[in-house]
C-alpha cells in the first residue's frame, strides 16, 4: 500500500509517497492533491525537508524504497554520496561508478530519479559545469544549489 502526503516548500508543492519499506517518491507538483492515509514516515520526511529548507539540516536520515533496475538503484545510491554544497558532473559520476563511458546512461538514470532533494540529482552538472536537466526545472535546480552553497560551511547535523 502506498501512502501520500504533501509539503509546501519554498519552491512550491512537493508530493511524497511512501510504501511500507520507505519513501519511494518525492517530486514537485503544481498543486496540492489529496493525501491518502496517515504515515509516520511521510511526517518524518516532511519534518526533515522543513529542516533542510530552514538551513537546519544538510542530509536526510530516512528509509528509502528505491524502485528501479539494479543499475538505476546503483546510480541513485551513488548520488547520495555527493556532499551537501558540492557538485559533480555526469562524466565524473560515471567514473566513480567504474566506467567513464556510461556518462549518458548515468545522465538518463539521473533524470528518472524518483526521490528529489533526498537523492540529490540536482548536484550533478553538465561536463561544462553548466546547469542541465532537472525534472523539477532548471530554476529549482539553481535555487537548490545556491541554497546549499550558501550554508555548506555551517556545522549542521545530518
Image (cartoon, rainbow, N blue to C red):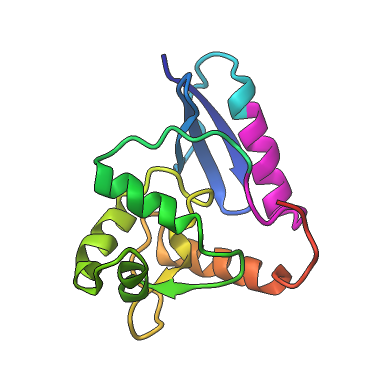
> Residue 97: horizontal and vertical position, in percent?
33, 63
Q: Nearer the viewer, residue 13 or 147?
A: 147
Answer with left or right where residue 150 lies relative to residue 91.
Answer: right
Residue at 69% x, 70% y is 152
Predominant SS of the magenta segment: helix
Q: Nearer the viewer, residue 13 or 53?
A: 53
> Residue 151: horizontal and vertical position, in percent?
72, 69
Answer with left or right where residue 135 lies relative to residue 151.
Answer: left
Viewport quadrant of the N terminus: top left
Q: Is 6 rendered above or below residue 52?
A: above
| Residue interval drawn in magenta | 43-60
> Residue 83: horizontal and vertical position, in percent?
58, 65
Image quadrant in which you'd find residue 109: bottom left
Answer with left or right where residue 92 lies relative to residue 101.
Answer: right
> Residue 48: horizontal and vertical position, in percent?
68, 42
Q: Is 90 rendered above or below residue 30?
A: below
Residue 52 on the magenta segment? yes
Q: Is 3 rendered above or below residue 158?
A: above
Residue at 30% x, 68% y is 94
Image quadrant in which you'd find residue 62: top right
Answer with left or right where residue 155 lies relative to residue 129.
Answer: right
Residue at 68% x, 57% y is 58
Image quadrant in which you'd find residue 79: bottom left
Q: Is 64 rendered above or below residue 133?
A: above
Residue at 50% x, 61% y is 140
Q: Nearer the viewer, residue 10 or 97?
A: 97
Amino acid at each position: 500500500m502506498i501512502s501520500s502526503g504533501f509539503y509546501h516548500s519554498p519552491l512550491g508543492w512537493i508530493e511524497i509517497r511512501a510504501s511500507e519499506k520507505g519513501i519511494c517518491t518525492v517530486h514537485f507538483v503544481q498543486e496540492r492533491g489529496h493525501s491518502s492515509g496517515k504515515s509516520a514516515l511521510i511526517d518524518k520526511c516532511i519534518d526533515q525537508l522543513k529542516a533542510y529548507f530552514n538551513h537546519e539540516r544538510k542530509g536526510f536520515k530516512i528509509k528509502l524504497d528505491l524502485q528501479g533496475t539494479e543499475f538505476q538503484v546503483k546510480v541513485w545510491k551513488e548520488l547520495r554520496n555527493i556532499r551537501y554544497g558540492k557538485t559533480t558532473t555526469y562524466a565524473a559520476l560515471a567514473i566513480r561508478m567504474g566506467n567513464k563511458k556510461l556518462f549518458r546512461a548515468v545522465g538518463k538514470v539521473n533524470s528518472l530519479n524518483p526521490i528529489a532533494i533526498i537523492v540529490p540529482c540536482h548536484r550533478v552538472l553538465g561536463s561544462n559545469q553548466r546547469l542541465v536537466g532537472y525534472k523539477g526545472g532548471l530554476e529549482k535546480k539553481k535555487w537548490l544549489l545556491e541554497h546549499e552553497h550558501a550554508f555548506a560551511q555551517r556545522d549542521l547535523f545530518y
